[in-house]
Image: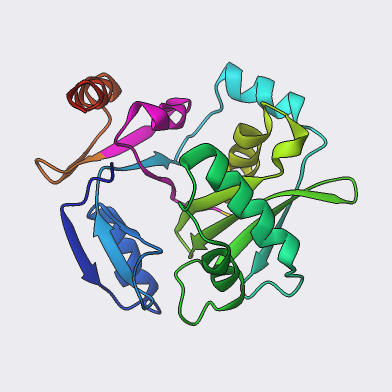
């Protein structure tokens, strides 16, 4: 279930216009046929002003100390077929077959002129690349968009560790907000493991920090479906 209250196309090359759209609850999407297509949804973000990690965040960071983060602007020069295989296998497993095609993953890595991600976080353990996250980044915001990792690792801390490493990088680079996409079902409740959370209330078109209210809405939607 994807909640969408509006769709429009914005000027992707205008950072201020993109940031303004995000402030109004819109997120860049991979479903359009051109750059700049955004959907208004129940977006969730972390306000990085005076942000602090929770004790659980710090525990995961300790468990993933060997995880190295590298950031590259797209197109990704080291692209190979193993990347879209890893991504397709991951999304087939966590979201269902056909959720993300290999061709779409390849396009997002190699054709930034028609796709919305602008950077990729690359995660390594030693010499081995273990995960990626296609993201939109400008001077003030990071949208952590399409993460995936090697399922063979069976590391239950890896997914959250990847988010936390990107979050650390965003703080170091003086970003204002770290967007985690939308939150509409119980499956996305892992996004609630942070301080300074804000979510876009699509009913009143305003940001809220009332996480208990958000949990009630998610639970009600899950029961209703």
Q: Quadrant of residue 198?
A: top left
> Extreme right residue here?
127
Magenta stretch contains residue 57: no
| Residue range (magenta) | 174-199
**Membership of 187 in magenta stretch:** yes
Depth check: 35 or 207 in front?
35
Q: Position of residue 30 (x, y in %)?
A: 41, 64
Residue 183 in sight here? yes
Q: Position of residue 131 (x, y in %)?
A: 70, 48
Quarter holding the C terminus is top left
Residue drawn at (62%, 36%), measured in percent from left and top?
159
Q: Which quarter of the picture shows residue 24?
A: bottom left
91 relative position to 5: left or right: right
Number of numbered tags placed on the structure image: 0
**Is 196 placed left or right of 124 in the picture?**
left
- Residue under the point 67% across and 57% down: 85
Residue 186 x, y percent position in the rendering: 35, 26
The x, y position of residue 221, in whole percent, is: 21, 27
Residue 219, relative to residue 183: is it above or below? Answer: above
For image coordinates 62% across by 53% down, the residue present is 87
Q: How is the image coloured?
A: rainbow
Question: Which of the image's four quarters has the N terminus?
Answer: top left
Q: Nearer the viewer, residue 178 or 49?
A: 178
Q: Quadrant of residue 215?
A: top left
Figure check: 75 above or below 39: below
Q: Is residue 169 visible?
A: no
Left or right of residue 223: residue 126: right
Residue at x-position 29% and y-position 38%: 199
Depicted 115 relative to depicted 164: above or below: below
> In screen coordinates, is 41 left or right of 31?
left
């Amino acid at each position: 279930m994807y909640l969408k209250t509006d769709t429009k196309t914005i000027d992707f090359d205008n950072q201020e216009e993109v940031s303004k759209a995000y402030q109004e609850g819109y997120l860049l999407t991979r479903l359009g046929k051109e750059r700049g297509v955004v959907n208004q949804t129940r977006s969730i973000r972390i306000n990085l002003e005076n942000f602090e990690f929770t004790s659980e965040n710090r525990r995961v960071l300790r468990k993933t100390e060997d995880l190295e983060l590298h950031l590259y602007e797209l197109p990704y020069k080291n692209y190979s077929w193993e990347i879209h295989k890893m991504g397709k296998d991951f999304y087939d497993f966590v979201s269902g077959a056909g959720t993300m095609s290999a061709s779409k993953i390849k396009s997002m890595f190699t054709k930034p002129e028609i796709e919305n991600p602008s950077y990729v976080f690359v995660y390594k353990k030693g010499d081995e690349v273990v995960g990626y996250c296609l993201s939109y980044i400008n001077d003030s915001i990071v949208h952590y968009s399409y993460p995936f990792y090697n399922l063979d690792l069976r590391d239950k801390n890896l997914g959250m560790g990847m988010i936390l490493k990107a979050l650390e990088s965003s703080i170091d680079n003086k970003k204002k907000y770290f967007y985690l996409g939308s939150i509409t079902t119980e499956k996305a409740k892992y996004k609630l493991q942070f301080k300074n959370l804000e979510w876009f209330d699509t009913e009143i078109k305003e940001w809220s920090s009332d996480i208990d209210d958000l949990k009630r809405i998610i639970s009600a939607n899950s029961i209703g479906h």
